[in-house]
Image (cartoon, grey):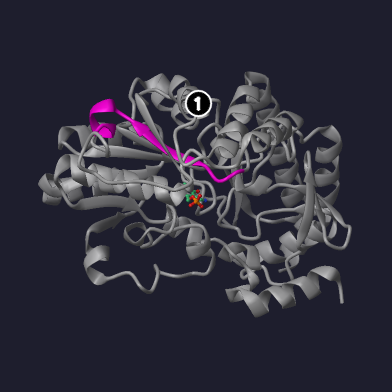
Amino acid sequence: MSNSERLFAEAQEVMPGGVNSPVRAFGSVGGVPPFMVGAKGAYLTDADGKEYVDLVCSWGPALLGHAHPEIQSAVHAAVDRGLSFGASTPDEAKLGKLIKDRVGGVDRVRMVSTGTEATMTAVRLARGFTGRELIIKFAGCYHGHLDSLLADAGSGVATLALPGSAGVTAATAAETLVLPYNDRAAVEAAFAEHGANIAAVITESAPCNMGVVTPDAGYNKFLKETTAKYGALLILDEVLTGFRASSSGYWGLSGKDEGWNADLYTFGKVIGGGLPTAALGGRSDVMDYLAPLGPVYQAGTLSGNPVAMAAGIAQLTHATDEVYAHILKQSTALQAKLSEAFNEAGVDHSIQRAGSLFSVAFGTSAKGVHNYADAQAQEAFRYAPFFHSMLDSGVYLPPSVFEAWFLSAAHDDEAMEKIFAALPAAARAAAAA
Ligand code: PMP
């Protein structure tokens, strides 16, 4: 029995499914998930001493690579000053300012601890500010595990093929309208019918939780214009894409050039440098509706935790243009090698992109993937054999076809060559499925 097998068996005695977050259980790809004991640069090391090139990067946070020396030393210094003070600390506004300076329309920032809290607060704030109840979300988008946004959600909900979650009341579900992504007519029809009671549209700025789906040209701008026309807010969920798709998130690839800002944004992952921090930000008149200035309540014992702030500041300070250029270059090279291997093996596929983020969808070359229905209709069964072949060759991919692939500044040419070398056999395994 390997160490990971033993650890997984022990974990299952203590935790539901042996995990603290569902996708880690390898439910859709099968097999025993390797338990990780170390991470450095582009590599993970499991409990049996096997090394993997990591294409998950902690699901996004490890932008600079694992255990980046500048982040590690900032964290060590913060730890030496104390772990948590339960009072305001200087670094909170400093990290807030780094976010504000990079993303248009972020006048104010509130730190929270997880992306779920950020979207939950954004939804409550939108309802409090507008005095309206309905929220529009798009099928296949994942915004965390708050009740009101679990319907037709992506990520683990998609991986487990669930329509939503048990435990969400019918009344809560009825306050969310779920529409197909990239479908302007559906948005127009919903506003025509319910416009006076729609508080907000929440959307991933580029969906990355049903696999990656590229927004149609001008789609986010259309959402901004439509919400503005009806007095609703646009909440751009950049928890995954923020400070990753570009130095100013996916907004930097859309709103920045097109001349629009969201009313509210949510961030997470990258801004915590690997520690639990997330944030919401946006227009000051909306953000000032939060307590203590306004009537919308939100709070957190560990919000703005000083160790997490130090990690986030170090991360964003070192996330230079060169870092983004490097990640995009390696991502583009990997996408080309991936297509080459699949074409060689005769595997029909398409690759969807959002900045340096991308994913593969099988059997979709004819029309690509534009929404959740397209993502679900793909030949998803080809992913498990592909994934396991890569894992055997020492490449750690997201254990679900409905997730994005992540690279980091530490993915040098040597790491990339290891990935490239593993691709032909894995593509043949996908072909044989
Ligand atoms: N929004 C998006 C777009 C996400 O990708 C995620 C997490 N993958 C979340 C929200 C929730 O963040 P967290 O897991 O930190 O609660």
Q: Give the range drawn in magenta.
A: 275-288
* Mark 1 nearby-residue class (10 Å; few <14, some 14–19, many ≥20): few
Q: Is the CB atom of the residue marked by disc 1 within 8 angstroms of ligand 1's nearest atom?
A: no
Residue with the mark numbered 1: 90
Q: Residue 380: x and y, percent? A: 59, 64
Q: In which quarter of the image is the C terminus?
A: bottom right
SS class, disc 1: helix
Q: Is residue 30 left or right of residue 88?
A: right
Q: Is residue 175 left or right of residue 356?
A: left
> Total label count?
1
Q: Residue at image x 70%, y 45%?
A: 339
Q: Residue at image x 83%, y 33%?
A: 413
Type of the residue with mark 1: Pro
Q: Residue 297: x and y, percent? A: 27, 46
- Residue 280 falls inside the magenta stretch: yes
Furthest-bottom residue in view? 13
- Residue 342 falls inside the magenta stretch: no
Q: In this view, does 403 lie to the left or right of 150?
A: right
Q: Residue 414: x and y, percent? A: 87, 36
Quarter residue 222 falls in:
top left
